[in-house]
Image (cartoon, grey):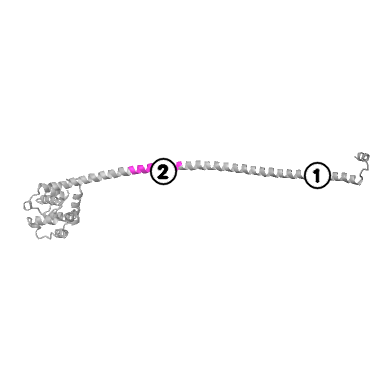
Amino acid sequence: MGESNFGTWIFAFLIVAVIFGWGGIGGLGGGNAAAVGYATMADVNAAINNQTIQNGLNQIALSSANNNYETAQLITNQNNTNLINAIQGFNNLGQQLMNQTNVLGSKLDQIGFQMENCCCSIKTLIKDNQIADLTNQLSQANNVAVNSAQSQYLLSQMGKWVANAPATAAAYTAAK
Amino acid sequence: MNPIMQMLSGNNNGATNIMFKAFGAMMRGESPTDFLKNLAKTEPRLQGLNLDNLEGTAKDLCNQRNIDMNNLKTQIEEFANSNTNL
């Protein structure tokens, strides 16, 4: 706006006030309306409209302030809602984590039980195999012993026969 | 009462009309220097003043007449910022 803004205009008003004076300041002298001409209707309307504009601006500022307050309230309410939702979300998440932890614990218990069961089965199987092996070895040993005894008996019988062979059928029969 | 309001309410000679004219010119976006120079054509008391340096001239006038310029300036600003006096 350059020179026409109020910052510059205020010095024009100061000059007019000092030169032409008014009753309140005292001793500044009177004006001369006839010399300067009267204000036109446009001048008066513009001066009064200035006040109307200021009133409008104040109303706009007030409205803006109210809107800002309402907006701030809405934001605060929304923030509170968001906060509550977040807290509820965390609570739900915590509950879910706890449930998952319980499920995992249960699974671990099951796995532990299964591992123990499996281990027991393996041990039993090993022992069964050992028993079968020992039984087999015992049976073989028995067989060896029986065979040995039988062989000894037969050899002893044969030796007796060889040393004292019967000369006749009657002697053979008698020897039996 | 605010001195500017006294001017606008017509408690003095001539100043009321001049102030209305000044406000009208300001609201139309006119230059304050041009306004005063135009006014000086018919107002002898403005003649001879340096209207190209309004701030300096205002200070000189206030000093010559022993007027507290800051106080006067404040009153004018208060009037401009007021929305209840008219």
Residue A20 appears at what percent x and percent y?
A: 11, 54
Q: Is residue A79 shown in magenta?
A: yes
Residue A33 appears at what percent x and percent y?
A: 7, 51
The chain holding disc 2 is A
Check disc 1 and give the amino acid type: Asn
Q: Circle 2 sits on which residue? A: A86
Q: Marks 2 and 1, how far apart in space?
A: 90 Å
> Going by the image, does B80 lie left or right of A117?
left
The residue segment tinted magenta is A74-92
Residue B22 appears at what percent x and percent y?
A: 13, 52
Q: Which image quarter: residue A2?
A: bottom left
Vertical placement of residue A33 versus A89, above or below? below
Nearest the viewer among A170 and B1 is: A170
The chain holding disc 1 is A
**Would you say residue B10 is visible in this rendering?**
no
Q: Is residue B19 shown in magenta?
A: no
Question: Judging from the image, what secondary structure is the residue with disc 1 in?
Answer: helix
**Would you say residue A128 is visible in this rendering?**
yes
Q: Taken as a whole, is the magenta stretch helix, strand or loop?
A: helix
Q: Which image quarter: residue B33?
A: bottom left
Question: Judging from the image, what secondary structure is the residue with disc 2 in?
Answer: helix
For the residues labelled 2 and 1, say whether their Cβ atoms are less than 8 Å apart: no
Residue B82 appears at what percent x and percent y?
A: 20, 48
Q: Circle 1 sits on which residue? A: A147
